[in-house]
């Protein structure tokens, strides 16, 4: 079992740069990877996504990629030629119209903001850089998964304990089920005798009423389905595949059976058990929201 929350980090030096990738994952209905990295490295975003998606099946993962030059990385000087030509043409037009003798100098051009810019220039080819980024992201994703698995072990232990509590509540309900009809029959008979006083009691009619009540209040089918759901739940807890969605669906089915029992149960002890089961289910649902 794997949680959907975790953190992973990896770093390395390449081509005069220090590369660091931080991964943070949280709950999400699907699998989503959001990458934040320097604009000039954005073309390698897909490599980071592929590395994360190879190890993560569900959850939102934020990938933060930082790239810092260590001072030894070569830099490329880039000239904005369009800007330079525009300034030169404008200067010539002004000189002619205003009858000026001065001409635009190289120093004047170099002083113009944005005319010359410095760009980091990695020595490695694009394919090599992409491969290194993928490897670094994969290392971070591996650490992320390790942390998610550790948290998953805690969730597994908690859910196993809670499903055990649910099974004990079900056994109590099984024991109470036959008592409900007996108590109803006794109360109904006493009430009828109280109302009829000295008139004779129609035992056949009484038996019919009790039979109708027993049919309406029967929870044997719900208890049987609950037992089946609990077995499936415990099996899923030990599955090697992502089971978060399946467990969430199964909890909904369990909740449906518990609600049905509650609607049929006109008996205080059983109603109390239903309340406890619903409270336990709500805690289980909260935990399941964190499972991949």
Image: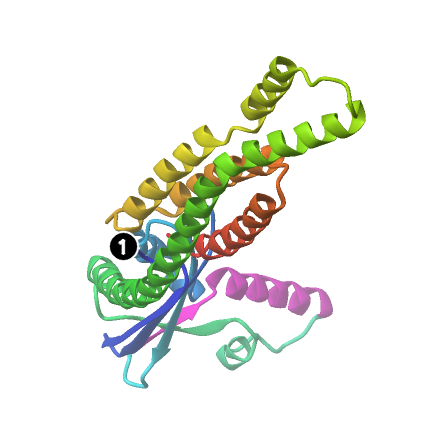
The answer to whether 53 appears left or right of 263 in the picture is left
Relative to 227, residue 62 above or below: below
Q: Secondary structure at mark 1?
A: loop
- Is disc 1 surrounded by few (<14), some (14 to 19) or many (20+) residues within 10 Å? few
Query: Is residue 30 visible in this depiction of the protein?
Result: no
State the colouring used for the structure image. Answer: rainbow
The answer to whether 224 appears left or right of 108 in the picture is left
The answer to whether 76 appears left or right of 80 in the picture is left
What residue is shown with label 1? Answer: 55
Residue 232 within the segment the image draws in magenta: no
Residue shown at 27%/63% (left/top)?
133
Relative to 120, residue 208 above or below: above
Relative to 247, residue 105 above or below: below
Of residue 253 and residue 272, the one placed in the foreground of this image is 272
Residue shown at 31%/63% (left/top)?
153
Residue shown at 21%/67% (left/top)?
124
Query: What secondary structure characterizes most of the magenta part?
Result: helix
Can you give x and y, in whole percent of width and height, for residue 64 in the image?
A: 41, 67
Exactly how many numbered labels are in the figure?
1
Of residue 56 and residue 37, the one placed in the foreground of this image is 56
Q: Which residues are magenta?
A: 75-98
Can you give x and y, in whole percent of width and height, for residue 80 in the image?
A: 47, 65
Relative to 32, residue 107 above or below: below
The answer to whether 70 appears left or right of 202 in the picture is left
Residue shown at 39%/56% (left/top)?
159
Can you give x and y, in whole percent of width and height, for residue 273 in the image?
A: 54, 49
Of residue 247 and residue 70, the one placed in the foreground of this image is 247
Query: Is residue 263 visible in this depiction of the protein?
Result: yes
Extreme residue in the front direction: 198
């Amino acid at each position: 079992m794997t949680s959907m929350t975790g953190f992973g980090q990896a770093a390395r030096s390449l081509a005069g740069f220090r590369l660091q990738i931080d991964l943070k994952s949280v709950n999400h209905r699907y699998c989503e990877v959001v990458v934040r990295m320097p604009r000039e490295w954005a073309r390698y975003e897909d490599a980071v996504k592929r590395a994360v998606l190879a190890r993560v099946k569900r959850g939102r993962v934020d990938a933060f990629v930082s790239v810092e030059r260590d001072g030894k990385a070569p830099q490329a000087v880039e000239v904005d030629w369009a800007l330079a030509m525009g300034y030169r043409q404008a200067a010539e037009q002004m000189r002619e119209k205003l009858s000026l003798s001065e001409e635009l100098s190289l120093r004047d051009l170099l002083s113009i903001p944005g005319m010359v810019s410095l760009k980091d220039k990695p020595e490695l080819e694009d394919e090599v850089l992409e491969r290194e980024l993928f490897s670094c992201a994969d290392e971070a994703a591996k650490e992320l998964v390790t942390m998610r698995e550790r948290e998953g072990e805690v969730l597994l232990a908690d859910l196993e304990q809670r499903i055990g509590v649910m099974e004990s509540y079900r056994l109590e309900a099984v024991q109470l089920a036959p008592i409900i009809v007996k108590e109803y029959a006794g109360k109904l008979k006493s009430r009828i005798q109280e109302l009829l006083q000295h008139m004779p009691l129609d035992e056949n009619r009484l038996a019919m009423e009790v039979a109708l009540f027993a049919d309406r209040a029967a929870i044997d089918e719900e208890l049987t389905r609950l037992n089946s759901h609990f077995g499936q739940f415990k099996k899923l807890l030990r599955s090697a595949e992502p089971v978060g969605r399946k467990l969430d669906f199964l909890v909904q089915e369990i909740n449906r059976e518990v609600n049905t029992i509650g609607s049929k149960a006109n008996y205080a002890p059983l109603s109390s058990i239903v309340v406890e089961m619903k409270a336990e289910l709500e805690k289980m649902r909260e935990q399941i929201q964190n499972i991949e």
